[in-house]
């Protein structure tokens, strides 16, 4: 038996895996009270706003993939807000900017997370709004033991809070210093925001769906939107070094609604893997798997051998190059063009025995790729970024991050399944809106300030997000949901997990616990958009002989701590037996699964 840090949980009632133990148990408690997987996921999502405020917030975003007991087909819930109407390339250029700042009001998209969670609850949940929000209200008003990492994050931005972001200082530096690890922390402003949403819902009458829609209107058209617009007019210092006002207005919020969409899918080794389409980076995973199969060598599917790691890293580099050239919200290129067998063979032909240090986008349908000119100027330059406000970065070699993301997976006894990756609106992303108890997000930084690119800044367009939930089907039945925080690493770590679980036959927990690695030989999605050609970061548990072979093949090996890369969550269900299972990430000593 292979050693694992914890068991793969198994049962028949329901399973939850999230990035925080309180969120996991909250979701499980909802299942125990008769709620379904969607009720549970929404309750966990709002609790994560409270207990992981350095990793997500109400004004952030959440993409999810769901399958229901009635409709087994995967559907994507897009809770990614678009660029506001005032967010034009011309506006940023007039401010003398080459990149959109990584923090501050100017970097905000229209908030998407809350409307998406409420849409999921309305369309597929069963419980009332007040019942689902009760745990988050309780933790925000009565308090919860604060993670050490939250206080550490506040410490990195303490001077900024004290000198400029005074509303954030009022919340996070109440006695003049960051909150201590394990201290009981409350957020009265957010608790009151949630209570008002519940009250607005109740005023709409007894109908459950009408109450949820009333709360959505209060968010997008009522008191929340009014506070966002009022506060957004104030200038605050951002990562550009200057002070700027925000661009999100009440009209922008009123025009927004989360949406249901069709996923991008790949049939692979008897499974169908579902991801978001090209407004997210999810197809990177699908492209990489298709490219590996096109190599015609089963040994390349082993993520523990030098042969396998080399091929996988090279396939990922090619897929990420395509992300830079082709992924975005313009809808010009069909995702099927990037996933066709012919295109996979073309890309596989580029993988040789030596590690590539080039950015090599392909020509799907014979089209000419175009990359941002900024990348040509900064190719190979690693920026030493001291600004801790800039959000979700590449994971450092010591495993420490300046910001990150959350994840939620839930499966219930009826066969409902959900994978969701909430993020954005970090406490360090923007000044706290005092009457609401949370800041705006900073996802706008993922656009380019250059015309004619797949991810050029355009009002009303969604940024090309890194958030990437996953769902797996077999014979038309949903069998597994997974995901991880990690920005540009999300689909890399998930690919290793899927290779181990789907192709290698490992259990959920074995596949999560196995040594992780990822390539940094790609343009970062986050400010300052740097790149490390040839860099391959590995947990030092990877076999030394394997590392030597990879070094000889030209990879620039960077060793990380033994348990530092990846924050995978996963749940599964066997449709033949009804047995459900879950695994959670031991890294960071924070994620937990629970179930029975």
Image (cartoon, helix red, strand yellow):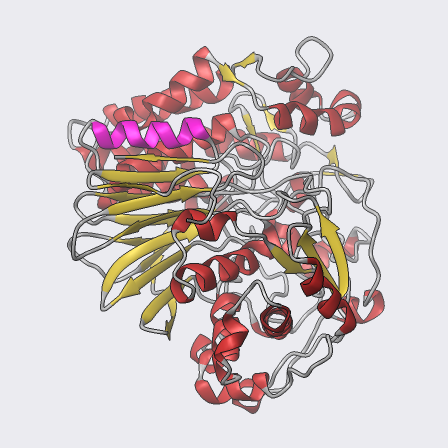
As rendered, which of 70 and 2 lies closer to the eye? Answer: 2
Q: Position of residue 91 (x, y in %)?
A: 71, 54
Question: Horizontal placement of 433 versus 44: left or right?
Answer: right
- In which quadrant of the rendered view does residue 472 lie? bottom left
Q: Report the magenta stretch's main SS.
A: helix
Q: Is residue 409 visible?
A: no
Q: Is residue 431 above or below residue 271?
A: above
Classify 502 as above or below 157: below
Q: Nearer the viewer, residue 447 or 518?
A: 518
Q: Name the residue located 75 percent from the left edge and 29 percent from the top edge.
A: 156
Q: Residue placed at 37% from the left, 20% from the top?
A: 195
Reply yes or no: does residue 396 show up in magenta: no
Check the image and report above or below for 3 versus 169. Answer: below
Residue 27 is covered by the magenta coloring: yes
Left or right, residue 271 beside residue 520 = left
Q: Is residue 80 left or right of residue 123?
A: right
Question: Which is nearer the eye, 325 or 346?
Answer: 346
Residue 100 in the image: state x and y as whole percent. Answer: 71, 52
Q: Quadrant of the C terminus?
A: top left
Q: Position of residue 387 (x, y in %)?
A: 78, 39
Residue sticking out furthest to the front: 1
Magenta range: 21-32
Q: Position of residue 560 (x, y in %)?
A: 71, 48
Residue in the image at 63% along x and 65% along y: 456
Residue 16 visible in the shown view? yes
């Amino acid at each position: 038996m292979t050693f694992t840090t914890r068991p793969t949980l198994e049962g028949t009632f329901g399973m939850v895996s999230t990035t925080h133990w309180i969120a996991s148990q909250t979701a499980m408690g909802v299942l125990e009270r008769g709620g379904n997987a969607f009720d549970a996921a929404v309750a966990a999502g709002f609790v994560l706003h409270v207990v992981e405020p350095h990793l997500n917030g109400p004004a952030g975003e959440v993409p999810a993939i769901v399958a229901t007991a009635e409709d087994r087909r995967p559907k994507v819930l897009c809770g990614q807000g678009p660029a506001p109407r005032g967010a034009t390339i011309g506006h940023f250029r007039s401010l003398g900017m080459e990149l959109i700042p990584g923090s501050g009001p100017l970097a905000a998209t229209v908030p998407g997370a809350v409307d998406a969670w409420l849409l999921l609850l309305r369309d597929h949940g069963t419980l009332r709004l007040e019942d689902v929000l009760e745990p988050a209200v309780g933790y925000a008003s009565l308090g919860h033991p604060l993670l050490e990492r939250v206080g550490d994050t506040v410490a990195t931005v303490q001077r900024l809070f004290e000198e400029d972001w005074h509303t954030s200082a009022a919340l996070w530096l109440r006695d003049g210093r960051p909150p201590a690890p394990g201290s009981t922390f409350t957020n009265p402003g957010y608790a009151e925001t949630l209570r008002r949403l519940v009250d607005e819902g109740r005023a709409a009458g007894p109908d459950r769906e009408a109450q949820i829609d009333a709360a959505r209107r209060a968010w997008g058209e009522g008191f929340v939107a009014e506070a966002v617009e009022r506060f957004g007019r104030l200038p605050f210092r951002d990562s550009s070094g200057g002070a700027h006002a925000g661009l999100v207005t009440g009209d922008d919020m009123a025009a927004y609604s989360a949406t249901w969409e069709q996923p991008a899918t790949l049939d692979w080794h008897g499974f169908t893997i579902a991801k978001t389409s090209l407004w997210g980076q999810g197809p990177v995973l699908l492209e990489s798997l298709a490219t590996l199969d096109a190599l015609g060598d089963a040994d390349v599917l082993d993520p523990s051998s030098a042969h396998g790691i080399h091929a996988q890293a090279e396939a990922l580099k090619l897929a990420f190059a395509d992300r830079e050239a082709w992924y975005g919200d313009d809808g010009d290129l069909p995702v099927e063009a990037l996933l066709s067998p012919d295109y996979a063979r073309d890309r596989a032909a580029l993988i040789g025995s030596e590690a590539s240090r080039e950015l090599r986008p392909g020509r799907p349908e014979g089209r000419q790729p175009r990359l941002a000119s900024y990348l040509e100027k900064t190719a190979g330059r690693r920026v030493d970024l001291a600004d801790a406000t800039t959000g979700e970065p590449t994971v450092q070699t010591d495993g420490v991050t300046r910001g990150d993301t959350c994840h939620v997976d839930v499966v219930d006894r009826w066969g409902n399944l959900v994978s969701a990756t909430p993020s954005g609106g970090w406490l360090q992303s923007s000044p706290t809106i005092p009457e609401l108890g949370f800041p705006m997000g900073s996802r706008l930084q993922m656009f380019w300030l250059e015309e004619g690119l797949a991810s050029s800044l355009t009002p009303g367009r969604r940024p090309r997000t890194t958030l990437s939930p996953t769902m797996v089907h077999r014979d038309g039945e949903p069998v597994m949901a997974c995901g991880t925080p990690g920005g540009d690493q999300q689909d890399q770590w998930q690919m290793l997990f899927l290779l181990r679980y789907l192709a290698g036959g490992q259990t959920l927990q074995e596949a999560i616990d196995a040594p992780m690695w990822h390539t940094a030989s790609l343009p970062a999605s986050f400010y300052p958009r740097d790149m490390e050609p040839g860099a391959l970061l590995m947990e030092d548990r990877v076999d030394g002989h394997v590392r030597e072979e990879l070094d000889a093949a030209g990879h620039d090996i960077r060793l990380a701590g033994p348990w530092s890369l990846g924050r995978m969550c996963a749940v599964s269900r066997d449709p033949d037996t009804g047995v459900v299972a879950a695994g959670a990430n031991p890294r960071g000593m924070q994620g937990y699964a629970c179930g029975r």
